[in-house]
Image: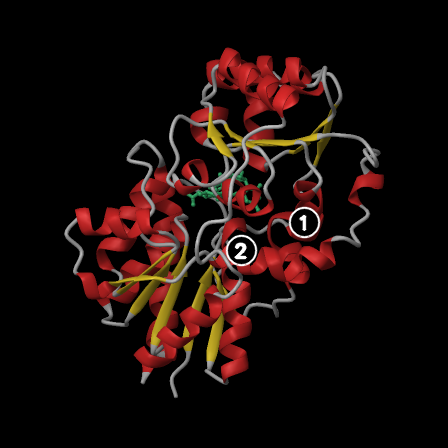
Amino acid sequence: MDPVILVVGARPNFMKIAPLHAELARRGIPQLLLHTGQHYDENMSKVFFDDLGMPEPDIYLGIGSGSHAEQTAKVMIDFEKVCLEHKPSMVVVVGDVNSTVACSIVSAKLWIPCAHVEAGLRSFDRQMPEEINRILTDSICDLLLTPSADGDENLRNEGVAEERIIRVGNIMIDSLFNNLEKSKSSTIHSELNIEGKGYGILTLHRPSNVDDLASFNSIISGLEHIGEQLPIVFPMHPRTRKQAEKFGILSRLEAIPNIVITDPIGYLDFVALTAGAKLVLSDSGGIQEETTALGIPCLTLRHNTERPITVTEGTNVVVGNDTTSIIAAADEIFQNGGKAGRVPDLWDGNTAARIGDIIEKNIG
Ligand code: UD1
């Protein structure tokens, strides 16, 4: 039987593919794990394979950093060669990064069935590179596997045929639930000297926040207030460090009261940190979902979200990057404990099994 190729490229992809890789292995379905190398630092990539118990990739493209066009084009050129050599029965892409759109275009042009996991999410903000990737990927993939009803609705509104849309649930929550127990042996709290203390977590990397000095400064002003209430753990993304250095504001970041700046943190340590946090401030996509699943208050430092169910059902509040709104939302959490939520349907840890059924049916 020809193999299924599972594509990963950047940090948020690894926790979405790990449960599916394990599921296909359990079913004896031949597969190749392909890493484009969009993220390549040890702490942005390798540590996730180790933490998630994923084997080394079968194929590594080593694409690295570059402009969006360079990165996307390089992945396409190399991935086409891989597909011609291995003749996959199906390609599976996840999420919304440049590697996702690049591999889905290649598959479509070679008539290889392609499944998109996490289909249908829309922020309706085309200034986000990920939004362009989502729209393009969904427009050419054969199977659109959605995490929630809003995803189905968005696809229908774009005229997608009903038979291409299948709601499977949120696969990232499979990884979260699979690893929650294991994360309890993490020593990250004592390493960061926050054991037994209430603390917040901050992650920041979106171009709309860190490529724009006014937005970046406005967020820092909010953090200066929050840091007076409790320690803030800030694992700094490489692009954020680069931008802070370029703008000359690294020292302002370092001077935020009670800030604990670290390099990017591995999966198990980050789950352990999230599970014990008083609040999480982030512009990430996945963290909005993980906090909802864990019942931890999340303030999303963006003006929109492609994951509205984390707001309507979960613990997420979209606050933007304005200082006053950030402070008001954080104070609300300090005073009233933050928004209560519930875990959405099909975020149950069984999404990989549902996707396994669909793949098995479609590769015949
Ligand atoms: C990418 C994804 C984004 C995702 C994020 C998670 C796209 C368009 N963006 O953004 O959706 O939320 O990953 O992290 O695909 N760098 C390193 N080491 C690495 C990787 C990156 O130093 O291992 C630096 C490089 O200077 C690079 C910059 O970070 O230029 C940005 O990396 P890139 O892959 O272009 O996008 P991210 O901002 O990480």
Tell me the tag on residue 173: 2
Q: Secondary structure at mark 1?
A: loop
The answer to whether any part of residue 289 appears in the image is: yes
Q: Position of residue 137 (x, y in %)?
A: 29, 54
Considering only vertical position in the picture, is 188 above or below 335? below
Mark in front: 1 vs 2: 2
The structure residue drawn at horizontal position 44% and vertical position 30%, both measured from the top left corner, is 207
The structure residue drawn at horizontal position 38% and vertical position 39%, both measured from the top left corner, is 308
Q: Residue at x 48, y 67 (%)?
A: 352
Specify the quadrant of the image occupied by residue 265. Answer: top right
The residue to which callout 1 is attached is: 266
- Which SS class for mark 2? helix
User: What is the distance, in whole Å, between disc 1 and disc 2 at their CAs?
Assistant: 17 Å
Q: Disc 2 residue type? A: Ile
Asked if labels 2 and 1 touch by Cβ distance under 8 angstroms, the answer is no
Is 126 positioned to the left or the right of 92 in the image? left
Q: Nearer the viewer, residue 52 or 154?
A: 154
In which image quadrant can residue 129 be found? top left
Residue 119 as seen in the image, left or right of residue 223: left
x and y, in percent, of residue 180 in the image: 67, 55
Mark 2 crowdedness (10 Å alpha carbons): few <14, some 14-19, many ≥20: many
Q: Is residue 350 left or right of residue 147?
A: right
Q: Residue 361: horizontal and vertical position, in percent?
A: 33, 80
